[in-house]
Amino acid sequence: MRACVLTATGPDHLEITDVPDARVPQGGEVRLAIRAAALNHLDLFVAAGMPGSALQFPHVMGADGAGVVESVGPGVTAVRVGDRVFLNPGISDYSCEFCRAGEHSLCVAYKLLGEHLPGTMAELVTVPVANVALMPRLSPELSWGEAAAFSLVTLTAWRMLVTRAQLKAGETVLVWGIGGGVSLAAMRIAKLRGAKVIVTSSSDAKLQQARRLGADVTLNYQTQKVPQEVRALTDKRGVDVVVENAGEATWDDSLRCLARGGRLVTCGATTGPRVTLDLRRLFWHHWSLLGSTMGNAAEYAEIVRLLGQGQLRPIVDRVYPLAEARAAYERLAKGEQLGKVVVEVP
Ligand SMILES: [Zn+2]
């Protein structure tokens, strides 16, 4: 099968080439003929080399994907060959203590497609049937690219805001870096939940797009001091929830923006993982610092249900053919996008 693979550690080692087909599906598994895959920051980290990672090269890249069910393993009844589906890239063992409690993204054997397992940027991928969802009928019809772009960022942002931060209607949320997929999904989920959303970017063009997509307030973090602006906008109170995924570059300012009783929820450290914290401010202000990764099966079912109602339809930034997958990586690496960068598989 044709695939975008990593042949050695480092983004210079991304290649479009032929590799053996994804394996024949076993019990409870399906094999998909991929039509589109979407990129995430995860793909950049995998290409650059993750700490402790032990990839077998050539490694097929890509976490998110959508396509047609090509074959099914024994015992699969939820989908049939020919069904149009998209997938949840988080693969659990569905048997450990955390899975039995319904917390699949806390699974002790949690694996992500394209990170620990062969990914979606290929003509075929094999996954548990529990990880696929039927594409809803929408008007206008959901494209392959939109379907591929949906799962990872929407699931991540949903768990962060709804489950972890317990966001309520009428609260105010600060979202950093609105060009990023999780940030954009977080903004739209926060609006759907009736919150007021302040977003940041270094690009005025992206801030303008964010206003069109529902942002209440936009701040350019290169030309404006975000904590001062947030204090001014909230009568010195600060925001109820901060959505973080930058880490070192934004952490101190995130805390300066946080109200008493505020919740900071983070799913990433794109600018570095080491931050400092004055514990006196943490306890005095009754702050909650919350970590979050991906989401469980119930959360995934909920966002799929919302998509079926036409909510949270993904924003696709640009679509590249598989042959030009390296250009797609470069666009993401340069942070030029607003919305998801997609690779179509012919
Ligand atoms: Zn488990």
Image (spheres, grey):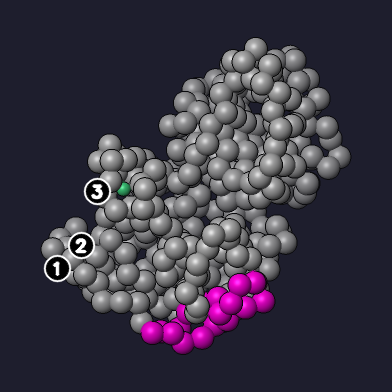
Neighbor class of circle 2 (other Cα within 10 Å; few <14, some 14-19, many 20+) is some
Q: Position of residue 215 (x, y in %)?
A: 64, 36
**Residue that badge 1 annotates:** 74
With 176 as the anchor, is 53 left or right in this view?
left
Q: Nearer the viewer, residue 306 or 124?
A: 124
The kind of residue tagged 1 is: Pro
Question: In the rendered image, is residue 218 in sight?
Answer: no
Q: Is mark 3 within 8 Å of ligand 1?
A: yes
**Residue that badge 2 annotates:** 28
With 342 as the anchor, is 143 left or right in this view?
left
Disc 3 to disc 2, C-alpha distance: 14 Å
The kind of residue tagged 3 is: Ser
Residue name at image x 50 percent, y 67 percent: 54
Residue placed furthest toward the bottom: 18
Q: Is mark 1 within 8 Å of ligand 1?
A: no
**Residue that badge 3 annotates:** 95
Q: Position of residue 261 (x, y in %)?
A: 59, 16
The kind of residue tagged 2 is: Gly
With 288 as the anchor, is 144 left or right in this view?
left
Does the segment drawn in magenta span residue 259?
Answer: no
In the image, the segment drawn in magenta is 1-20
Q: Secondary structure at mark 1?
A: loop
